[in-house]
Amino acid sequence: MRSTPIFIAVLAAIFSTALVANVIRFAGFRNPMGLAIGASALFAGLALGLKRRRGAVTVGLILSCAPFLLTVLNIAVGVARDPTSHNLFPFELLIALAIGLVPAVGLSIGYAIPPARVPPRASLIAGGLAALAALSSPAVGLIYNRDVETSVQATLRRLLAAENGYRAASTAHRFTCDGPLLPRFEHERWFANTQLGLTTPDHFQGPGGYWFMLQCGPLSRGDDVSIRAYNGYGGEFTIDASGTILRGSQKSR
């Protein structure tokens, strides 16, 4: 049946999208830009496989191996500079292998489909979809980041309002860094920095993978408070007791 190649391609797209989504989630990246890039890699592999030419297949194999080889090179350079920089390198290699599997799946399926069953210009269409997904990925990431940053700043303001509410109801008229005591945030999954010997649950993970941390200062005794939000990848916001939000070193309005 002529619908067989299309049916197989759809199944491959579903499988590869799910694979990339789980890899990105496991690695800590929640930006859907990675999904767009994964879709681009899948369609690129499919386009090269449908060509069935030695050169195209070679390019597809290089594309599939590139994530692993680049990760190995990055680990080698990092370890040469700092022997402790890649303590979890086996996981890095596994993630790189999983990412490389996406174009490999497309390449294999495209090559396995009998030429007689390949619709006209199928390779061109798959290549066009790959280019479209790749070109749209920055816009997808930008829209996602803007939405996340808006949610993060709204959460910071709600946390500050909760701190002010706690302070108004406290007989000592002080802020708290004990997160579960804050009204409307009692049910968040708060954590303590037990590695530093601390027992007060003062941070939780919120929108977009950002961590929200209450900071009372070692000498303030609750007289002052600031709340920091960070994601470990350069994103950082801080709100002080006056309600001013800082983005890194830049003031955010």
Image: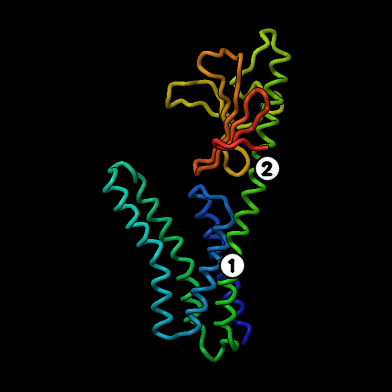
> In this figure, what is the number of numbered marks?
2
Residue labelled with disc 2: 150
The relative height of residue 111 versus residue 36 in the rendered view (above or below) is: below
At x 60% / y 44%, what residue is drawn?
208
Nearest the viewer among 193 and 226 is: 226
At x 68% / y 11%, what residue is drawn?
173
Rounded to the nearest angstrom, the CA distance separating label 1 from label 2 is 25 Å
Q: How crowded is the residue under tag 2: few (<14 C-alpha within 10 Å), some, or many (20+)?
A: few
Nearest the viewer among 124 and 14 is: 124
The relative height of residue 33 versus residue 5 in the rendered view (above or below) is: above
Residue 7 horizontal side relative to residue 85, left or right? right
Q: Earlier in the sequence, mark 1 or mark 2?
A: 1
Mark 1 or mark 2: which is in front?
Answer: 2
- Where, quadrant-wise, is the N terminus in this rendering? bottom right
Most distant residue in the top direction: 171
Q: Position of residue 37 (x, y in %)?
A: 54, 63
> What SS does tag 1 mark?
helix
Q: How crowded is the residue under tag 1: few (<14 C-alpha within 10 Å), some, or many (20+)?
A: many
Residue labelled with disc 1: 133
- The label on residue 3 is none
Most distant residue in the bottom direction: 116
Residue type, numbered disc 1: Ala
Quarter of the figure with residue 101: bottom left
- Where, quadrant-wise, is the C terminus in this rendering? top right
Residue type, numbered disc 2: Thr
Q: Position of residue 85 (x, y in %)?
A: 33, 43
The relative height of residue 20 versus residue 166 in the rendered view (above or below) is: below
At x 48% / y 66%, what residue is drawn?
102
At x 37% / y 55%, what residue is drawn?
93
Q: Position of residue 203 (x, y in %)?
A: 56, 29
Quarter of the figure with residue 52: bottom left
Q: Position of residue 7 (x, y in %)?
A: 61, 77
